[in-house]
Amino acid sequence: MHKVASLGAVRAGAEVKMKRYVNNPLISRCSLHIYMKDKEQINFRECHKELMKATPFALYVDIPPMKCFGISLLEEILANHEMGNVFNIGNKSLPFIVEDVALILGMPCTGFPVHHYGSSIEVSKLHKRFGKDTSFTRQVIHGHLIDLVGSDEKEDIEDTVRLWILLLLSTFLAPRLAYVCSPQMIEYLDDIERIGSYAWAVAFHELILHNIEEASRMVKMNAKRGRHDEKPRKNQFIFGCSYALCVESKLPIHPSEQWVLEGQKGKTNSGDFARAEEASTPAVSKNAQMASLVDALKAAEESRKAENEDFRQKLESLMTQVEGFAKSAISLRQEKEKPADV
C-alpha cells in the first residue's frame, strides 16, 4: 500500500513537472550583458581606449548599464515576420533594412563588404599569432586579453584592441550558435586604421536574416500548438545581433520575461534585469538624444512659422486698412475737385 502511494506521488509529481515545462527552443546568443561583464574584467588602459575610439566600435568602449531585451519580445517580433526582411506591424508591412541596423547599433552601412561566409583567403594577424586553427571563442578571447592587456609593446596593444572587437562581435554584434563570430570576419581587423572603411552594418543585417524564416515558422507553430509540450523540440538559433530587431518592436511586452537572450531557462528576476519596452544600445541612447534635439528644432520651427503667419495676417490687415484709407482720400479729393454748382 505504501509503495502504491509512493508510485502515485511520483506520477503526480511528474505530471506537475510536465505542466510546468515551457517549451521554448528559440535561442539567441546576442547578449550585451555578457559583453559588459567580460569587458569589466579586463583593465583596458588609455593606450587601448585611444585606439578603440578610433574604430567604428567606439560607442562600446565606455557604456552605461543597459536594459534587458527579453526573449518574449523577440518572439513577438518573429511572430509578426511576413517574409524575407518584411514584418507586419499593426496594419502595415515594414521592411527591416540595413539602415535600421546602422541606426540601432551605430555602425557604418557603406564601404567595403565584410564577408562572413565561405573560406578565408588571407590568414588573419590573430591567427598567425595564436595559431591558424585557433577557435576564438569567448573564453579563448578572454584568456588572451588577460595575458596581453598589461603589455606596452605596440604589437600587443594592437592585438588587444583586435581581441576586444572580437569579444564584442562574439557576444553581441555577430554571435552564431555559440559565443563566437564568423571566422571570416577576423581578417578585417588586421589593419586597425581601415576598420572604419568596411560596411559592418550590412554584414550584421545579413547575419540576422540568415535563418529568420525558420525561426519565425517555429514561433508561429508554437503559438498554434501551445507552449506546453511533453517533448522538447529542437533548438532554433537566431544569428547575429537580435537587439537590432527592436526597430520592429512597436509591440507590448509580456508582463514577465521568461528568458533573457543567453538561451538560459528560468524566469527573469526583475531585481536583476530592468524591463524595457524596447532594447537599448549605446547607439539607441545617442539616437534618443538626437531625436529630442530634432523635436526641439521642429517645435522651434513650428513656433517660427506660427509667428510668421501671425505677422503676415497682421500685415495684410494693415495693408487693407491703408488701401481703404487711400481710396477714401482719393474719393475725398475727387469730391473737392468737382466744379461747384452755379
Image (cartoon, grey):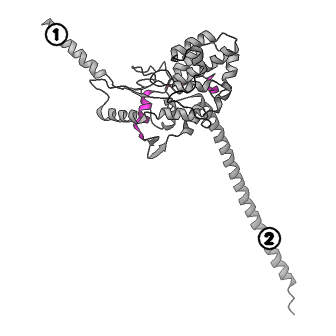
The question of residue 79 being in magenta is answered with yes
The magenta stretch spans which residues?
56-84
Q: CA distance from mark 2 to mark 1?
A: 109 Å
- Can the viewer see residue 131 in this picture? yes
**Residue at image point 54% right, 20% down:** 35
> On residue 170, which mark appears?
none
Q: Which residue is mark 1?
A: 5
Q: Quadrant of residue 203?
A: top right
Rendered location of residue 291, percent (x, y):
62, 38
Quarter of the image for the C terminus: give it.
bottom right
Residue 36 lies in the magenta-colored region: no
Q: Earlier in the sequence, mark 2 or mark 1?
A: 1
Q: Position of residue 283 (x, y in %)?
A: 60, 31
**Residue 41 quadrant:** top right
Q: Position of residue 174 (x, y in %)?
A: 52, 27
Q: Which residue is mark 2?
A: 325
Q: Quick one: 26 or 126, which is closer to the camera?
A: 126
For residue 98, above or below residue 169: below
Residue 240 image point, x, y percent: 49, 29
